[in-house]
C-alpha cells in the first residue's frame, strides 16, 4: 500500500500523528517492530512490522497471546510511516479518535527469507525481540468462510505464537499493561493532553469501552489538576526563594561593610554601640 492510504485519511494540520517524511535505511539488518495499544471506539492492539520503508500494520482486537493454542485475529490495515512506531499520544476526532500507547517495541527478523513472497503466500514466520514479545511467531492469512464471516477477505490474518521458551499461558496484556516509552497508562498519556474535551464528546460512551473511558478521563483530569497545583507551588516557592535572595543581596549592598563588622583590632567602628 505504501503510504497513500495512510495520508489520504489524515489532515496533518489537525492530528499529531507523523506525516511519514522519514525514509527507512535500506540494509540487511534487524527491522523495527512495535505494538501500539489503541483505545478508540473499542480497545485493540496495532501490530506493526518494518518492511520496505514503511510499517506493515495489523489491528489485533484482543492483543497478542503467548499461548500457542490461541489464534488471535489480525486485520490488515493501511501501511504506516516508520516514525509512527515511536508515536504515543492523543488522536483527535475523525482520525481514529482515542489514546495511543506504545505498548511494545523492538526488532524482528524473518524466518522465511523472502518477506514479500511470504506475504503474498499469506504465511509469514518471524522472530520478535521486544520488551514483552519475544521468540517465534507466525502471521497466517485466513480464507474462505472464516474470513468472509468477518468481512475481512484478504485482510483477515491470524497472529499465533510458536512453541518455544517464550511461550506460555501468561496473559501478557494483563501482566504488562503499561507503556514501554513513558511507563504510563492511558490516563497518564491523556493527562499530558486535554482530558476535559472528552467529558461530552468522547470516542465511546456506552458499553465496556465507554465505562473504561469514563474512568480514564476522570483519573486523567485529577492527574492534570494535581500536576498543575504542584507546578504552581514550585513556581511560587522558586519566586519566594529568588525574591528573598535578591532582598538579601540588596541589603548587603545598601549597608557599608564598615558599619556591619568589627575592625581588625576588635573594636567596633564609630557610631556602633
Image: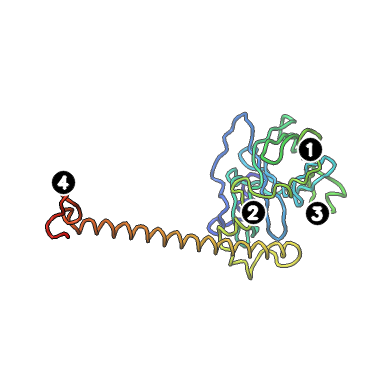
C-alpha distance separating marks 1 and 2: 25 Å
If you read the primary sequence from the N terminus, does the residue marked by circle 4 or circle 3 appear first?
Answer: 3
The residue singled out by tag 1 in the image is 167
Q: Do the residues labelled 1 and 2 touch (CB within 8 Å)?
A: no
Callout 3: few (<14), some (14-19), or many (20+) C-alpha neighbours within 10 Å?
A: few
The residue singled out by tag 3 in the image is 151
If you read the primary sequence from the N terminus, does the residue marked by circle 2 or circle 4 appear first?
Answer: 2
Q: Which residue is drawn at 69% across and 48% down?
A: 46
C-alpha distance separating marks 2 and 4: 66 Å
Residue nearest the viewer, comparing 94 with 271: 271
Q: Is mark 4 on a helix, strand or loop?
A: loop
Q: In this view, does 195 lie to the left or right of 111?
A: left
- Specify the quadrant of the image occupied by residue 193: bottom right
Residue nearest the viewer, comparing 150 with 232: 232
The residue singled out by tag 2 in the image is 185
C-alpha distance separating marks 1 and 4: 82 Å
Q: What element carries label 1?
A: loop
Q: Is residue 220 above or below residue 121?
A: below
Of the two numbered discs 4 and 3 in the rendering, the one whose residue sits closer to the viewer: 4
Q: Which quadrant holds the C terminus? A: bottom left
The residue singled out by tag 4 in the image is 264
If you read the primary sequence from the N terminus, does the residue marked by circle 3 or circle 2 appear first?
Answer: 3
Of the two numbered discs 3 and 2 in the rendering, the one whose residue sits closer to the viewer: 2
Callout 1: few (<14), some (14-19), or many (20+) C-alpha neighbours within 10 Å?
A: some
Q: Position of residue 186 (x, y in %)?
A: 64, 56
Amino acid at each position: 500500500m505504501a503510504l497513500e492510504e495512510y495520508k489520504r485519511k489524515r489532515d496533518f494540520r489537525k492530528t499529531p500523528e507523523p506525516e511519514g517524511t522519514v525514509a527507512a535505511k535500506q540494509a540487511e539488518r534487524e527491522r523495527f517492530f512495535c505494538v501500539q495499544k489503541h483505545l478508540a471506539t473499542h480497545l485493540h492492539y496495532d501490530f506493526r512490522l518494518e518492511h520496505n520503508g514503511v510499517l506493515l500494520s495489523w489491528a489485533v482486537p484482543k492483543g497478542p497471546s503467548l499461548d500457542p493454542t490461541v489464534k488471535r485475529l489480525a486485520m490488515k490495515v493501511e501501511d504506516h510511516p516508520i516514525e509512527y512506531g515511536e508515536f504515543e499520544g492523543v488522536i483527535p476526532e475523525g482520525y481514529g479518535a482515542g489514546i495511543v500507547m506504545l505498548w511494545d517495541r523492538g526488532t524482528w527478523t524473518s524466518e522465511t527469507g523472502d518477506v514479500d513472497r511470504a506475504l503474498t503466500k499469506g504465511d509469514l514466520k518471524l522472530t520478535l525481540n521486544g520488551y514483552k514479545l519475544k521468540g517465534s511467531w507466525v502471521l497466517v492469512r485466513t480464507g474462505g468462510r472464516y474470513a468472509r464471516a468477518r468481512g475481512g477477505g484478504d485482510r483477515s490474518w491470524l497472529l499465533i505464537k510458536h512453541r518455544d521458551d517464550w511461550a506460555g499461558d501468561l496473559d501478557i496484556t494483563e501482566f504488562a499493561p503499561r507503556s514501554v516509552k513513558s511507563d504510563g497508562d492511558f490516563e497518564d498519556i491523556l493527562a499530558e493532553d486535554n482530558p476535559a474535551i472528552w467529558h461530552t464528546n468522547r470516542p465511546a460512551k456506552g458499553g465496556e469501552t465507554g465505562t473504561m473511558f469514563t474512568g480514564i478521563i476522570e483519573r486523567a483530569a485529577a492527574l492534570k489538576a494535581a500536576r498543575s497545583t504542584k507546578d504552581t507551588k514550585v513556581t511560587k516557592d522558586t519566586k519566594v526563594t529568588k525574591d528573598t535572595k535578591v532582598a538579601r543581596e540588596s541589603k548587603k549592598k545598601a549597608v557599608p561593610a564598615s558599619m556591619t563588622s568589627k575592625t581588625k583590632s576588635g573594636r567596633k567602628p564609630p557610631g556602633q554601640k
